[in-house]
Image: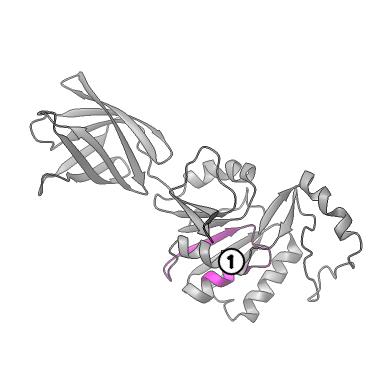
């Protein structure tokens, strides 16, 4: 669901003033578009965008999908119903959370959908393999440190709103226009690494500075700075270009596993390159 700021909420007050009082806490409860929330207002995600977001994340039956700000449960329900995923929605409003549970039951997916009444900034969603958002940019940015600490490879999709300086890996398009954003949580590689297995190099040291899924590094051989590299991560997958001792361009492609990298040089079949983080 879309989260709109308190300031924007004022624009809707006149529209809502004539609406009937809701039956809070009963099965007759239905949310009002732009109704007040904790610090934002509620707007539903369209059915088409729900499908686009889940398709962009390539959700499968093996996934655990967390929807942060679940509203009436539309996204978790669709993730379970269409893709067979397990899904968890976190919703602060207890009446909306209760409605989402009823909707999941009516859709026949209550065995695969859990709705938690709670605060998205306090609840644990570290087991997610997919996270869906329909929040304002400032709320996405507030969540960013938590999202970047999720397991590398976790997919994140946001309807409409970006995440500040965290550049998306892809855009979600609807009718030729950007309707959302897609990220893959990158592995953490910042620090100093020792590489072995690069032909004609003695042990190489690479000091890496990381910014989300992008990084650059200074390559030193025998304690002499030789070149600067730039690379990119997609989850645990890492790649960067470098020049060999003959000044020919080469590409390292590998996998990050905590403080180790294992990979190969694209242009040299059968090559084995191993890197160990030393600090």
- In this image, 101 relative to 197: left or right? right
Q: How many numbered tags mark residues here?
A: 1
Q: Which residues are magenta?
A: 60-79
Residue 262, image x and y in percent? 22, 45
Q: Which of the pair 15/103 is nearer the observer?
A: 15
Q: Residue furthest top?
A: 224
Element assignment for label 1:
helix
Residue, disc 1: 75
Q: Is residue 196 magenta?
A: no
Residue 185, image x and y in percent? 43, 48
- In this image, 2 relative to 143: left or right? right
Picture quarter containing residue 267? top left
Residue at (64% x, 57% y) in the render? 69
Residue 265, image x and y in percent? 16, 43
Residue at (33% x, 43% y) in the render? 258
Whether residue 85 is visible, yes or no, is yes
Q: Is residue 65 magenta?
A: yes
User: In the rendered image of this protein, does residue 194 appear above or below residue 107?
Assistant: above
Q: Residue furthest front?
A: 176
Q: Which of the pair 167/98 is nearer the observer?
A: 167
Q: Quadrant of the C terminus?
A: top left
Residue 42, image x and y in percent? 73, 58
Whether residue 128 is visible, yes or no, is no
Picture quarter containing residue 59? bottom left
Q: Which of the pair 108/7 is nearer the observer?
A: 7
User: In the rendered image of this protein, does residue 212 appear above or below residue 177?
Assistant: above
Mark 1 closeness class: few <14, some 14–19, many ≥20 residues within 10 Å: many
């Amino acid at each position: 669901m879309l989260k709109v700021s308190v300031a924007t909420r004022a624009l809707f007050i006149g529209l809502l003033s004539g609406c009937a009082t809701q039956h809070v806490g009963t099965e007759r409860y239905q949310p009002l578009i732009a109704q007040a929330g904790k610090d934002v207002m509620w707007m539903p995600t369209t059915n088409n965008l729900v499908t686009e977001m889940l398709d962009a994340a390539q959700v499968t039956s093996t996934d655990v999908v967390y929807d942060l700000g679940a509203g009436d449960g539309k996204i978790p329900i669709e993730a379970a119903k269409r893709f067979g995923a397990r899904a968890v929605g976190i919703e602060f409003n207890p009446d909306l959370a209760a409605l989402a549970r009823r909707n999941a039951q009516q859709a026949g997916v209550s065995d695969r959908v859990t709705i938690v009444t709670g605060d998205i900034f306090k609840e644990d969603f570290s087991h997610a393999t997919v996270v869906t958002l329909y929040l304002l940019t400032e709320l996405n940015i507030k969540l960013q440190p938590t999202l970047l600490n999720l397991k590398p490879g976790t997919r994140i999709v946001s309807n409409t709103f970006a995440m500040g300086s965290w550049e998306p890996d892809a855009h979600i398009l609807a009718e030729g226009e950007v309707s959302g954003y897609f990220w893959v949580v990158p592995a953490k590689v910042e620090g100093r690494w020792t590489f072995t297995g690069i032909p004609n190099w003695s042990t190489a040291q690479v000091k890496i500075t990381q910014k989300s899924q992008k990084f650059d590094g200074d390559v030193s051989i025998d304690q002499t700075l030789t070149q600067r590299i730039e690379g990119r991560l997609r989850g645990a997958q890492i790649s960067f270009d470098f020049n060999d001792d003959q000044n020919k361009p080469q590409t390292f492609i590998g996998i990050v596993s905590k403080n180790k990298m294992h990979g190969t040089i694209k242009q040299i079949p059968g090559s084995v390159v191993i890197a160990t983080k030393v600090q």
